[in-house]
Image (cartoon, rainbow, N blue to C red):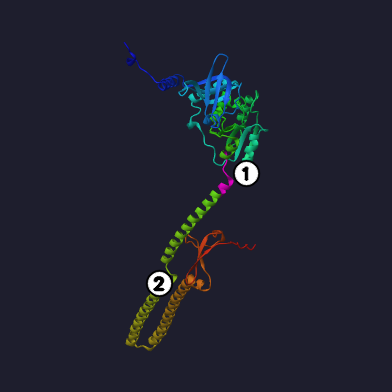
Amino acid sequence: MDNTQSRPVLTVSQLNKQARLTIEERFQMVWVTGELSNFARPRSGHWYFTLKDTGAQVRCAMFANSNRRVQMQPTDGQQVLIRGRVSLYEGRGDFQIIADQMEPAGEGVLRQAFDALKLKLADEGLFDRERKRPIPDIPKHIAVITSPTGAALQDVLAVWQRRVPTLQVTVIPTAVQGPEAEAQVLWALKAASKLPVDAILLTRGGGSLEDLWTFNLESVARAVAASKIPIVSAIGHEIDIAITDFVADLRAPTPSVAAELMVPDGEEMLQNIDGEFRHLTVLMEGQLREHQLQLDKLNLRLVNPESYLQQAWMRLDDSANRIQRSAERTLAGTSNQYDNLYKRLLSQSPSFALSRAREKLQRVETSLEDGVNRQLQSQASAIAMLARMLDGMSPLHTLGRGYAFLRDDSGSLVTHTEHALVGTTMTAQLQDGTISATVKEVTKQEKNT
């Protein structure tokens, strides 16, 4: 009996696809070390090679988007460490590794230590964004921790000299690789923390993973994380990554980029300042126009001094009328007394008494007349004095002689030179109107000693 119809049958393509999916699900990402052989680089830019050891070999592929980050030049016979995804090429049924990272095999232990420390510090929260402190927008003093003979320092100083020539820079020299580098970098970080600086730049040029290892040490990473001063880490080239890049407050891909990130462009700052100045000028001109309108409104509400004089003249006329009526009443009363006395004299008619009475009457009349005249003169003098005082207080005469009253923008009279500042606006009150003027120069009169 033929049972072929009851058994599942796969095509080769289906078999290879299921095998690929099974392999990729089982292995995912692996690190593998071995010797390079059959290395090929076609026009596409992809790399194809075999990785082998004394007992086995495996085909490998590394596509262009991954191999351009590799810092070594691979050749047959090299011992390398690759990281990749285990897969199967369905077209030929070849078991293979799709690599995304390659480095000399000697760096494998360092790479594992790097990954372990990175994971440890990340779990402690030392990479958290909340810990990052902002770099000052316009720092005045920066400390640089680097090799005094390295190209990185010269690149940084050249950028700062071009962008902000006035920036104060303190270079703390230190070894950046080798057995003495760790202690020197730790000492430099401690020394920088005691300086009155706004930020610290920790930098060096590119190199292998082993060359950069000082900046992957746990002691250095923790010292950077503990710094009270913001730190920028710029270790190696753009493709290089150090542990200090993760714990620092800012990571820059190169020393030059770090220098540009830490300070503003002087010319750009001047342009911004010029723009702000123009903006403030427009605002000030608008406020001056508004104040001028308010001043014009207040000026319209001012009372003409002539109205005060007219009121004074009317009060003066009222006073004169009252004095005149008082004098007339006094004269009328005196005249009545005189008439009564005269009648009494006529009724008595003795010559001596009449003569004495006439004399007494003459004296009384004279005295009364003198008293009335003195009172009239006194009232007239008082009236004249009031008229002169009112006339003297009138600003019209002063204005008529060519003088002017100066008032500041608040409407107050300006009487001293210290109240007139250069650039302020004054209003001059003339006899027939006002003039608005701006103070250009103030000359104070020397006092005579």
Residue, far right: 149
Q: Is residue 47 visible?
A: yes
Estimate how packed mark 1 is, as few (under 14), some (14 to 19) or many (20 or more) residues with alpha carbons within 10 Å. few
> Which residue is rendered at x = 48% and y = 59% of the image?
288
Quadrant in which residue 78 is drawn: top right
Query: Which is more N-terminal, label 2 or label 1?
Result: 1
Q: Main secondary structure of the magenta part?
A: helix
Measuring 62% from the left and 44% from the top, which residue is drawn there? Answer: 162
Query: What percent of the width, then of the height, locates residue 10?
Result: 38, 19
- Residue type at mark 2: give it: Gln
Residue type of the residue flagged with mark 1: Arg
**Quadrant of residue 420 within the rendered picture:** bottom right
Image height check: is 351 above or below 127? below
- Identify the mark at residue 311; answer none if there is no mark: 2
Q: Closest to the observer: 58 or 449?
A: 58
Q: Which residues are magenta?
A: 262-270
Left or right of 421 in this view: 352: left
**Residue 266 magenta-highlighted:** yes
Q: Position of residue 30 (x, y in %)?
A: 50, 21
Look at 32% across and 87% down and name the residue there: 347
Of residues 85 and 358, which is closer to you in this image? 85
Q: Give residue 162's mark.
A: 1
